[in-house]
Image: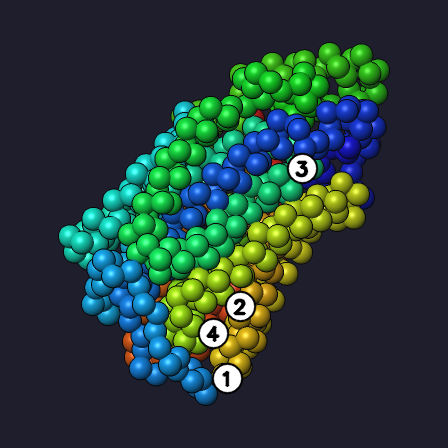
Amino acid sequence: MQRHVDNTQAGDGTEAEQDEAPLLAQQPSSRTGLCSARCGLALVLHISLFVAYALRVSLSIAIVAMTNSSHPHGWSGSAPHSSYPAFAQDAPVYNWSAETQGIVLSSFFYGYSLTQALGGYCSGLLGGKPVLGSGLLLSSVLTLLMPQAAELGVSFLIGLQVLLGLAEGVIFPAQYTLWAKWAPPLERSRLMNIADAGCTFGTFFALLVAGIICQTLGWPFVFYIFGGVGCVWCLCWFLLVYEDPAHHPWISAREQEYIMSLLAHQQVERPKKAWTACAGDVRQERRHWLMFYSFQGSSHGHSLPLVAMAKSLPLWAITVACFCTDWLFYMLLTSMPTFMSNVLHFDLRENGLLSSLPYVGNGLGHILAGLLADFLLARRVLGTAAVRKLFSALGMLLPAIFLVAVPYIGCSSTVVVVLLTLALTIISMTGAGININHIDIAPRYAGFLLGITNTFGIVAGIIAPTAVGLLVSQDLQTGWRNAFFVSAALNLFGLIFYIAFGSGTIQDWAREDTAVQ
């Protein structure tokens, strides 16, 4: 396997990089086996993110049953359903307006935005394992309390949603801190996208199953079941996950050396003459890398180059693109069940199934995009920056086109579902683009930077559902049309900005201060 090339164009690797490739290819541990420790971490993170997203979107489908409301006017040319679903008799129903529902759904993101950067910083100090596990456990407990909060009043539900956001806000930054210590450069895309696919599969499962639970057991059991499963899984998390390869008790010596040497090496400027050494000299120098990595790792310590970060155009490119993409993603994530119910007039069981379909495609798209991106990098077809921009362009431009087309479909609900499914499937291509570009430009600060860019993305998550509620409350047809147009326009702007200023190389302010002698 060839070492990660940080140049932005293919085929411009140095002689040192070319000489290094055969040496790494000789290591059996460089192959991503299904039984490897890093693949095991990807699977555990996949399930953890599956649970986290099931918890966070459960209210999006349950709120349809909690309010049992329908708009008197449908989409242009659509025919209203003859009857609306019957819910469990003992489940309470609340009289909340569209604006109130939008505020309830968006309140999660007020808390979610506050702990993004904090989660990244704390995971750099304390480790990703305890931070992520604690956030997931607290999220599960808070989900169990959701029915009681709704019974006390909408203000209590909003407050609990804010707390849930605070708890879940640390999960993604902590995950990036873990991957900065576990994912070799040429395997980042596929390992991280396999883990991230848990987000969309968790959303699919929640949207599919929550509707059935609402109709059979009542909407409170959505929160009881999901929250209970989350608590049980947290026990597995603390038992199965280790902070880095150096502390993993079952990892093979070859895999441990392979991961740690590559990650340590990418932080160090090696003299070109070192690569003319014999294999024994290389092994000796790898031991120095292992010692360096063991002490430095990917943690940032207490200091952060905040001024340099604020002046970094590549970081701003990721931030702007994340804001624009997350606007579209969160709008669909939180508002699609309402769109299916009030506009297309599906009952709750159909609503849950059809609302969840796009996320199946999104999860599969994440995995395929990661595999393809790593293939292009490993074969040096494209450089890092080119790969990130290519996948970002596909994941941002095509969904924008599909959203613009939705309002002109008319009464063909099948075509609308197909377009929304394609939009959320193809947006997963950004998983091999802007979503993991943080580790390319600053692996040492990956968790913190993810927290920063996610904070901006969450601002979009706060605004988007509220904006949809306000637009739809004025006029259903025109409101949804404007919501889709705004999302498409933002995606186009974010893509242009990212293509202009994005990068695939480690920034000077992100390099280690200490070199290996």
Side of 272 where 414 appears, left or right: left
Which residue lies under the disc numbered 3? 187
The type of residue carrying mark 2 is Leu
User: Residue 497: x percent and y percent?
Assistant: 55, 59
Q: Residue at x 82, y 16 (%)?
A: 279
What is the CA distance from the residue labelled 2 to the residue labelled 1?
14 Å
Say few, some or many: other residues with alpha carbon within 10 Å of mark 3 (under 14 / 14 to 19 / 20 or more). Answer: many
User: Residue 369: x percent and y percent?
Assistant: 66, 51
Residue 166, which numbered label?
Answer: none
| Numbered disc 1: secondary structure | loop
Residue 135 is at least partly visible in this image: no
Name the mark nearer the viewer: 2 or 4.
2
| Numbered disc 3: secondary structure | helix
Q: Residue at x 40, y 59 (%)?
A: 211
The type of residue carrying mark 4 is Phe
| Numbered disc 4: secondary structure | helix
What is the CA distance from the residue labelled 4 to the residue labelled 1?
16 Å
What is the CA distance from the residue labelled 2 to the residue labelled 4?
14 Å
Residue 36 is at least partly visible in this image: yes
Which residue lies under the disc numbered 1? 410
Name the mark nearer the viewer: 4 or 1.
1
Task: Relative to 444, say whether 497 is above or below.
Answer: below
Name the mark nearer the viewer: 1 or 3.
1
Disc 1, disc 3: CB below 8 Å?
no
Residue 420, which numbered label?
Answer: 2
Residue 196: which quarter of the image? Answer: top right
Say few, some or many: other residues with alpha carbon within 10 Å of mark 2 (under 14 / 14 to 19 / 20 or more). Answer: many
Which residue lies under the disc numbered 4? 485
Disc 3, disc 4: CB below 8 Å?
no
Work out whether mark 4 precedes mark 1 in sequence or the reverse, and give the earlier one. 1
Quarter of the figure with the C terminus: top right
Task: Relative to 22, say whether 166 is above or below.
Answer: below
